[in-house]
Amino acid sequence: MKYFSAECIYPICSPPVKKGVIVTEDDGTIVRLLPNKQGISEEIMEMNGILVPGFINTHCHLELSHLKNKVPSGTGLLPFLEKVVSFRDMDQSIIDEEIRKNDAYMYDQGIVAVGDISNKSDTKNIKSSSKIRYYTFVEMFDFMQSSLTQSMIEQYSEVYIQHEQNEKNSKSFVPHAPYTVSDELYTFIRSKNSDQDTVSVHNQETNAENELFINGEGDFYQFYKNFGFDISRFKKTGKSSIFKLLEVLNPFSKTLFVHNTKTKKEDIEAAHNWSKNVFWATCPNANLYIENSLPDYKQFIEKQANMTIGTDSLSSNWQLSIWEEIKTIKKYNNYIPLDTLLEWATLNGARALSFDDTLGSFEIGKKPGIVHIDVQWNENDFDILSSNPRRLI
Ligand SMILES: [Zn+2]
């Protein structure tokens, strides 16, 4: 048995416990959560700061780890995407090494599970051997070109086969974003996934995306031209882009809408009316890196949205750390309580990926990982901005 204590323990499934003790098996399985040290004769690992369950990173592209510091920040989404595509071909040994390093980095930062977007199979070996649980989202797009759909289906079906599915890891087919997927491809994706799968999709990351669907105009026409594609026959819907997704995705499976920087109250309401299985992933550092903006968190909180946190990739972030994402949200939205952000970063993410059988909270029988954060108490809240996470188990 192991015993851990700190100034405050956040079980997530129940209120925080000051000076409590977590008792685990040697392998980290939670045995008990005690309100104090009374009656314990064994050695207790006592710390300042707080203890939280391992973090869930619901949105990452681990295979893009070699793009760190390669793409300029602050350009906006469309120039960013063009730049990323131009860097895709690199020496395989560099790509493999960066994937390995950043899987290890995420583990050290207290991350226990990752929802990982894959367009390739570069990450399959590390996902098999990693101590992190992975949900691989095999991401498909055909630039809304029917002439490309069949070859994309063949290409990504091969990627899907390469990634493993077992007790630890899961996988599903997912669409990239409403502006890159044809109706035929949505039909394929829907036919391949079951109601038990989670589907992730990039959503409302830039105003141009809504403009395209609402008015049938904006920067996407030039973006497609630059790639040599013609979208002049694109039919606007008169509604924001998320409504297109609500038409074509399966309301019975879990859906994880990613980014949502331009999502409005009526979009959230529509998604919640469409399905009870809606989750939202926010990637604040990537939003600042690419578009210099953040989602309006207030409206998500008011609508009691299931919020989760992702890092996105190293092409649009300085590091892959959920604690750094929490710090960024807190820095610009100090009104959101730490308890709330911790729930987003742990249990909500575990539920979104259906990994809450073992992860997400200090519940007896789970093996969620224990992360120590060296926060200092400051007036009436923890001062988290200068703190760091440390993985205990
Ligand atoms: Zn992404």
Image: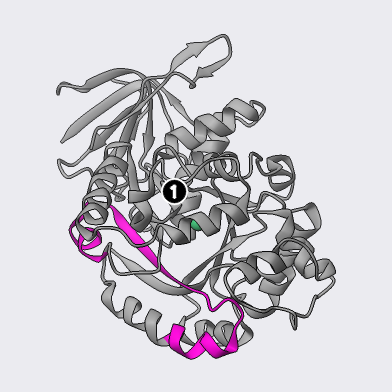
**Image x and y of residue 364, in percent:** 32, 46
Quadrant showing the N terminus: top left
**Image x and y of residue 50, in percent:** 39, 24
In front here: 232 or 170? 232
**Image x and y of residue 43, in percent:** 15, 21
**Image x and y of residue 382, in percent:** 51, 18
Q: Is residue 287 left or right of residue 193?
A: right
Numbered range of the magenta stretch: 124-153
Quadrant showing the C terminus: top left
Residue on which disc 1 sits: 315
| Residue 15 appears in the picture as rendered | no
Residue 21 placement: quadrant: top left
Quick check: is 239 in the magenta stretch?
Answer: no
Picture layout, residue 337 above or below residue 36:
below
Picture layout, residue 366 above or below residue 139:
above
Label 1 secondary element: loop
Badge 1 local density, few (<14 within 10 Å), some, or many (20+)? Answer: many
